[in-house]
Amino acid sequence: MEDLMRKRLHLTTYQLIIGGFALVILLGALLLMLPFAARDGQPTPFADTLFTATSATCVTGLIVRDTALHWSGFGQAVILVLIQIGGMGVITVAVAFTLAARGRVSLTQRSTLQEALAVPQLGGIVRLVRFILRTAFLLEALGALAMMPVFCRDHGLRGVWMAVFHSVSAFCNAGFDIMGSEDARFVSLTRYAADPIINLTVMVLIISGGIGFLTWDDLATHRWHWREYRMQTKVVLTVTPILILVPALYFFVNELAWLPPAQRALAALFQAVTPRTAGFNTVDLSAFSGAGQCILVGLMLTGGSPGSTAGGMKTTTLAVLLASTAAVLRRREDVSLFRRRVEESALRTAGAILLLYMLLFFGGAMVISGADGSPISACLFEAASALGTVGLTLGLTPTLSHISRIVLILLMFLGRVGSLTLVYAASAAPQRGLSKYPQEKIIVG
């Protein structure tokens, strides 16, 4: 039935992925408009609910209404469900419901899921879905149990809900919080900047969700035998620590001098983890220098790893681009990583992703700056946060006009579904002919 419907509608895999995310966002926006979704019992304007639903489903964390102060328990529950769906993927959740209902997954769902999760082969896709569900819920439950004593100590019985909410938000790299403070000094997790339990638990959850389910599956399958891992797993496990430790060292030395040494180390590590791509913060990011904010922008655009809850260009894209650059500098024809040759299609895709992200990043920031007259540096930060589905902010987003908010909505959506996915969805099927144009050299660089 599903295959027949797909043929009648002539939908491609990429169009199904985009349509699924759009449908969930629209449904979430309508639910958040209900009067009892807000604390004051009044309907929230569609523009605000659309922004919130997009931010939650695209696991970004940018907000125009404080999650704790504006939304009721029902509204927060809707946001949490959107985060969970967006983190694991709309297609993954749909397949999970199919398995629960009738236990059989159609070929259409399998092929769509393969594209959504960036799985190299179709075989074993159902087993992978079950593994994703078990891994996600187990890690989220452990995270909630770890944070529950701290939150219950400070907030009573409500601490149980806070632990669950922040655990899911952290693992799904969403960055939504329900701390509820109108004081900019105490937004996000800043009041727990010195608490090692909250900091370490949230960081572990962010990294766990950000390295990707394919990496976890490879680790579980080969039981920590490095030589048996796929090249992608080796790249993820190598690039991820570098992108955490190097920025953390810079933040410790140059950005957080006012903090005591122990808290300084914790804060530096947290601020290096959260831009990829969680959106929590434990210090005031507006106090960072221009260089520090530039590093944050770079981390936000890089993001997590393929098949993960994180957004961004992905760590593997960065690794392929660096390996390609190294091959050019060393005048080698082949690009290799961990003694494995990288296929040419991956090189072309990495270059296209970089170009598209740069166009969206700079283009979005310029439109926001032109529409609101805001400093371009702040607009670049917000644009990177939206496109990388991060959620970090310098406080600019709630003050933006409707035009700028629409730009951020589009950036969040493209950042989650992938800019290439949108291009493939809008373009015709690839044509493979036997003839080729004559080749001619062109000088670059």
Image (cartoon, rainbow, N blue to C red):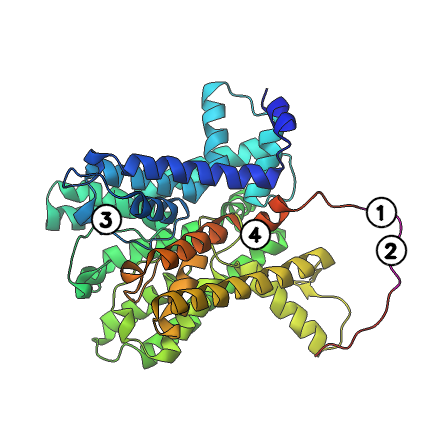
Q: Position of residue 309 (x, y in %)?
A: 44, 48
Q: Name the residue under label 1.
A: 433
Q: Residues within 10 Å of mark 1 (few under 14, many from 20)?
A: few
Q: Tell whether label 3 touches label 2 (CB within 8 Å).
A: no
Q: In this view, does 133 lie to the left or right of 440?
A: left
Front position in the image: 358 or 106: 358
Query: What's under tag 1, amino acid-wise?
Result: Gly
User: Separation of disc 4 and disc 1 at Cα?
Assistant: 43 Å
Q: In which quarter of the image is the C terminus?
A: bottom right
Q: What stretch is highlighted in magenta?
A: 432-438
Q: Residues within 10 Å of mark 3 (few under 14, many from 20)?
A: many
- Secondary structure, magenta segment, majority class: loop
Q: Tell whether label 1 touches label 4 (CB within 8 Å).
A: no
Q: Name the residue under label 2.
A: 436
Q: How crowded is mark 2: few (under 14 residues within 10 Å), some or many (20 or more)?
A: few
Q: Name the residue under label 3.
A: 67
